[in-house]
Amino acid sequence: MRKYFKKIIIINLLVFFCFSNLFGCKNSKISEENNTYLKEIDCNFFNEENIDFVYDMKAIDKNKVVILASNNNKLKYFISENNGESWQDKNLDILNDIDNEVNDACISKDNNIVITYKNKEGKYKNSILYSDGKIEELNIDHSNAKGDLPYNLIKFASNGDILLYDGDKNIKQINLKDKTIKNNFNFEYIGLTTTVENKIVNYNKDYIEYYSLDSGKKIDSVKNKMDIKSIYSDDIYSNSLFFINSDGVNKYKIENNNDKFIIEASKTSFGNSNLSPLYFSQVGENEYLCIFMEQGKNGFKYYLKKYSLSNLEVNNNESIRVYSFYENSLVKQIISKYNLENSTQSINYEFGLSEEESDKEADEIKRLNTELMAGKGPDILVLDGLPYISYMEKGILENMNDIISKYIDENSLFNNIIQYYNDSGYYALPLRFNIPIIVGKNIENVSDLITLTEAIKSLYEEKCTSILDIYSPTELIKALYYTNSINWLNENNSINTQEIKSFLENCKEIYEILEKTKSKNNYEYHLKNQKYYESINMYEKIKYLNREVSPAILLFGDSGSKIDIGSMKNFSQLGLMITICNEFENYSYRTWNSNEKGMFIPNTLIGINSRSNTKEESKRFLKLLFNNEYQNIDSTLGLPLNKEVFSNNLNSEIDNATNGEYSIDNKETIRIKKPSNEEITNFISVVENAKISTNDNLIILNQVIDDMEKYILDKQDINKTLKNIKNKVDIYLSE
């Protein structure tokens, strides 16, 4: 439990880094980078060594790298004197002889080791093992650390001092020469922290702050423009910082503000969201090492990767361009995996809008349409948010029958989903899908917005104090948009004002009821939560818009909800949802229907540019994406279209969730029970009955949501609202 807590802090709050290459290496991937080529090498160090936890990795000199790890709470020390090409296991028995439980450990560039441990009396202590073999106890008082935990060892500073984190907002700098506290750093917010040269660096989302390790005073505060996930540093080769974000790794020199992009995520393991970079370091003039961590069912798993720049020759085959309107996490992982495994064909990923450009949707659509109509553009299109039906009618999309026919013949995919896209051929196909779900009290007859409104009115008449966990008109509109806007457009692509009118009138009636039942505390919490999602990247916003069903909200008694609406994106909530429906009277779940058919929400809809120069290569790539291996990538990002992967993930998640507990209004607990075979079969039948796609055109929603909100809040009458909506949508459709 201690080690897990420590690692959470390291990943989410602090920062660490360093790398290595161990024993044998395989599966190198080469990609072009400014007339040089970046090579990623998978190394098998953690396969050959018996290691269950990694504390630190550090370059201690040019060509020398150290890894500090443990097995069964015994420290293990490995050193390489050739940039990780080979390793020696050094004896640390002198520290292990302390015979107490090690909590934390780190290495200095002088090869000194400091450990935090818990003695037999239950008190946290520190010892240092010097490079000359001497050991000394450090008199560090851990009583001021937050909670029943010790100070965490952040790292050694470049000057040899130790930095300790109290779990809150404070970092102590301890001079090892005289064992005194040299500086106390108090931050308003500690995000990602490291040291470089003679500075401590703290990144708090908006700013990168620099403080002097000599004076303890702030040197500078720089407005941050990057979406930084991790920060690392180098004390040996270049005194540089390394920023890791969704694009890859940037090398930044403070002295001259020089920023250089060195590792591309889409062509390396940095594009795999299941792997967290744990330690990163420069180990040669053009060599870098990284230890990645993956959290699985049986604990942590570690991987060592080496990156080197060289002038090797590469295959000059034309690369495939993949485009999405918004940045897509699943696509990034797929491309990263493919590029790592294929040296004959590379795939480049680009997306239209960044977070800062989210108000330029119409402009980006125009730009892309112009490019496509000119016979140019990307080879593969991720069609989420794009007018794919219009593209199909204009001949922009390639027929993909030959991609999907094999899977249809084998009956290995959910054909009820696939067949929706069969319009004399398959011109668009989803990689994943979600199922819109309604769960709660007295909802057995709910299938659309009208019947939902009636159910909410009925619960209000029963004096229910909380009905639906929604607190603003905008949130209500967004929650209901996917499943209730399917008929907003007529077959001739004109706007259906009557359908929109009905939608608005029902939303207004629901909102007026919810206003009478919402609590002040819940409302304020909800506003904070909404502001958070307004600040994150566009892809996350889209995921939030398509809200995940959360049956736990039904367990909060008077302050909870009686109904929850959302989508089943994975199987994490299924066991709890079925348990609640079994335990509470008149509770059930069902899906939204359209024309008596179940609905689904497509996720990562793909198509091929019919004028692409790499159509055959693109088809070979896309064909892979429906097999077991690729459908199993990150099961949190939508239900797999592949039946076998679907079944395996379903059974695995149900087994994991069984016997978990939830508190009911802080008075009693409910234990999640394993669904019966019949209940699982019933859920699968819900999925198999999903034959109608929801509306996923977010651009239309963004065009009309302001007017809709004004109507719900009585700031605009229905006629003016409908007129404004029609004008805006007509302009968009004409473009």
Image: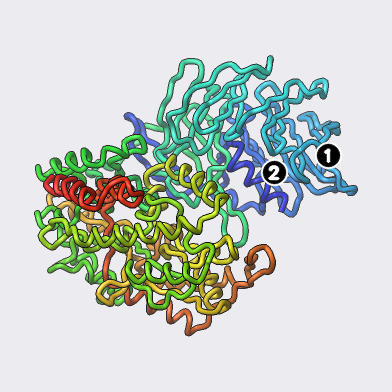
Label 2 sits on what residue type?
Asp
Q: Earlier in the sequence, mark 1 or mark 2?
A: 2
So how many labels did they put on this image? 2
Residue at 36% across, 54% down? 478
Judging by the rendered image, the residue that carries numbered circle 1 is: 125
Q: Residue furthest right?
A: 121
Quick one: SS at disc 2? strand
The reply to whether residue 10 is visible in this rendering is yes
Measured as percent of width and height from the top left, residue 568 is found at 42, 65
Residues at marks 1 and 2, CA–CA distance in whole angstroms: 26 Å
Residue at 17% across, 51% down? 609
For label 1, the crowd category at 10 Å Cα-Cα, with few meaning under 14, some 14 to 19 and many 20 or more, is: many
Judging by the rendered image, the residue that carries numbered circle 2 is: 89
| Left or right of 344 on screen, residue 24 | right
Label 1 sits on what residue type?
Lys
Q: Nearer the viewer, residue 395 or 405?
A: 395
Looking at the image, residue 428 lies above or below residue 382 = below
From the viewer's perspective, is the residue at label 1 or at label 2 nearer? 1
Q: Nearer the viewer, residue 672 or 468?
A: 468
Measured as percent of width and height from the top left, residue 374 is found at 9, 42
Looking at the image, residue 326 lies above or below residue 196 = below
Q: Nearer the viewer, residue 627 or 146?
A: 146
Residue 226, picture quadrant? top left
For label 2, the crowd category at 10 Å Cα-Cα, with few meaning under 14, some 14 to 19 and many 20 or more, is: few
The quadrant of the image that shows the N terminus is bottom right
Q: Which mark is residue 529?
A: none
Quick one: SS at disc 1? strand
Residue at 69% across, 39% down? 167
Q: Nearer the viewer, residue 537 or 269?
A: 537
Residue 625, picture quadrant? bottom left
